[in-house]
Amino acid sequence: MEHFEGKEVLVTIITFLGEYKERDKLSLIEELSKATNEQTPVKEVDRRSNDRIQIEYQKNIYKDFGYFYNRKMGGFMMV
């Protein structure tokens, strides 16, 4: 299980209280699944933009050269 250390996983738990028809339960689960999977995808470049080394690059480039290093496309961060 070492390869799972330090990993985070988003889990959705759906609990039905009361009595519901099986088809209604499955319909709701399907709708939730579609809504979740149709969200805007996160690009790998944006995911890595918050790596410690990227933050250090940003700080040092600004400090040494006065240039703003944009770590994340579509985002802006003050240094």
Image (tube, rainbow, N blue to C red):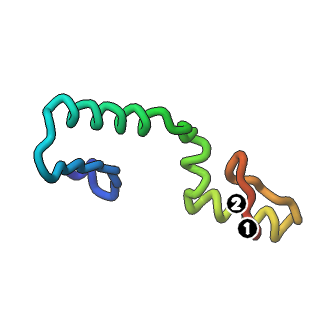
Eyeballing the image, is 24 above or below 46? above
Q: Is residue 74 left or right of residue 52?
A: right
Q: Quadrant of the C terminus?
A: bottom right
Q: Between residue 54 and residue 79, name the one nearer to us.
A: 79
Residue at mark 1: 59
Q: CA distance from mark 2 to mark 1?
A: 6 Å
Proximity of marks 2 and 1: CB atoms separated by less than 8 Å: yes
Eyeballing the image, is 47 above or below 66? above
> Residue 52: x percent and y percent?
56, 62
Q: Is residue 47 left or right of residue 61?
A: left
Q: Residue at left 42%, top 39%?
A: 36
The secondary element bearing badge 2 is classed as: helix
Q: Between residue 47 and residue 12, name the one nearer to us.
A: 12
Amino acid on which the number 1 mark rests in the picture: Lys
In the image, which disc is placed on residue 68?
Answer: none
Q: Residue at left 32%, top 50%?
A: 9
Q: Between residue 62 and residue 77, name the one nearer to us.
A: 77
Residue at mark 2: 57
> Residue 3: x percent and y percent?
27, 48
